[in-house]
Image: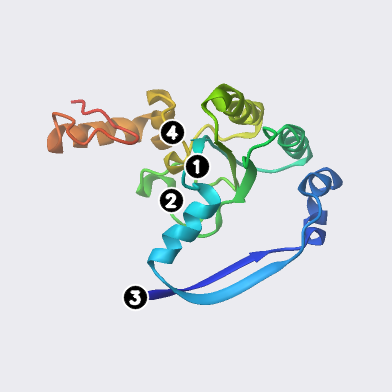
């Protein structure tokens, strides 16, 4: 089985509409486009080469953003200039919305379907002694962007940030409903890895 794969980086001129500050932070880069047919296993290899390279330590955190106005961009650019030196860490804002918004909020556990952007400070580094420095940068940009955040979070983009963040991902009402379902199907919390919902009657 194979898949069609395409990858493109746009020239920096396409970023001009979001402001000179972001444009200068992005810097100079050329357009790159490639297309090829590859085995499915290569999809995982390509994905890990960009967001989870083997052998590196990493820390992820995230926030949904409703809008990306001048004030939010200014904060993002300021913190992005301070990406930990000597590491491949990334400061990213990803587009959200689209078809995600077509489903009503109560139809699935996912919250913040109205959000238009996703903040993802993606911290990567090699040495254990850089743990605190790199994680502090990720938490710093996340916390600085909270005034522009929805309060929800996408659990695939965070590590262990405590039960409050898991509740924020679903909303309290939905989280409590899922906890009751968990109590029916997994009362001993056998499946407790990842972002755990604790069983509760």
Of the residues tagged 1 and 2, which is closer to the observer? 1
> What residue sits 81% from the left and 49% below the top?
23
- Which percent across, then down, holds residue 26? 76, 48
Q: What element carries label 4?
A: loop
Q: Provide the residue designation for mark 4.
A: 159
Q: What element carries label 3?
A: loop
Q: Which of 125 and 31 is in front in this view?
A: 125
- Which percent across, then down, holds residue 15? 78, 56
Q: Provide the residue designation for mark 2.
A: 104
Of the residues tagged 3 and 4, which is closer to the observer? 3
Q: Provide the residue designation for mark 1.
A: 112
Q: Nearer the viewer, residue 107 or 46?
A: 46
Q: Is mark 1 on a helix, strand or loop?
A: loop
> What residue sits 35% from the left and 31% below the top?
173
The CA span between labels 1 and 2 is 10 Å
Of the residues tagged 4 and 1, which is closer to the observer? 4
The CA span between labels 3 and 4 is 32 Å
- Which percent across, then down, holds residue 104? 43, 51
The CA span between labels 3 and 1 is 35 Å
Precedes in sequence: disc 1 or disc 2: 2
> What residue sits 63% from the left and 45% below the top?
92
Q: Which of 199 and 113 is in front in this view?
A: 199
């Amino acid at each position: 089985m194979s898949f069609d794969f395409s990858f493109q980086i746009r020239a920096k001129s396409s970023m001009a509409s979001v402001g000179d500050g972001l444009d200068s932070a992005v810097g100079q880069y050329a357009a790159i486009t490639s297309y090829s047919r590859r085995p499915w296993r290569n999809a995982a290899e390509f994905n890990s080469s960009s967001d989870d390279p083997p052998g590196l330590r990493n820390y992820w955190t995230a926030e949904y953003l409703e809008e990306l106005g001048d004030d939010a961009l200014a904060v993002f650019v300021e913190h992005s200039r301070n990406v930990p030196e000597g590491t491949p860490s990334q400061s990213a804002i990803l587009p959200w919305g689209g078809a995600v918004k077509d489903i009503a909020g109560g139809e699935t556990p996912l919250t913040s379907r109205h959000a238009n952007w996703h903040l993802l400070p993606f911290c990567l580094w090699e040495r254990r002694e850089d743990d605190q420095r790199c994680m502090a940068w990720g938490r710093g940009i996340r916390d600085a962007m909270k005034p522009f955040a929805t309060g929800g979070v996408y659990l695939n983009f965070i590590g262990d940030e405590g039960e409050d963040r898991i509740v924020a991902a679903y909303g309290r009402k939905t989280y409590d409903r899922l906890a009751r379902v968990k109590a029916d199907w997994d009362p001993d919390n056998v499946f407790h890895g990842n972002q755990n919902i604790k069983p509760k009657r």
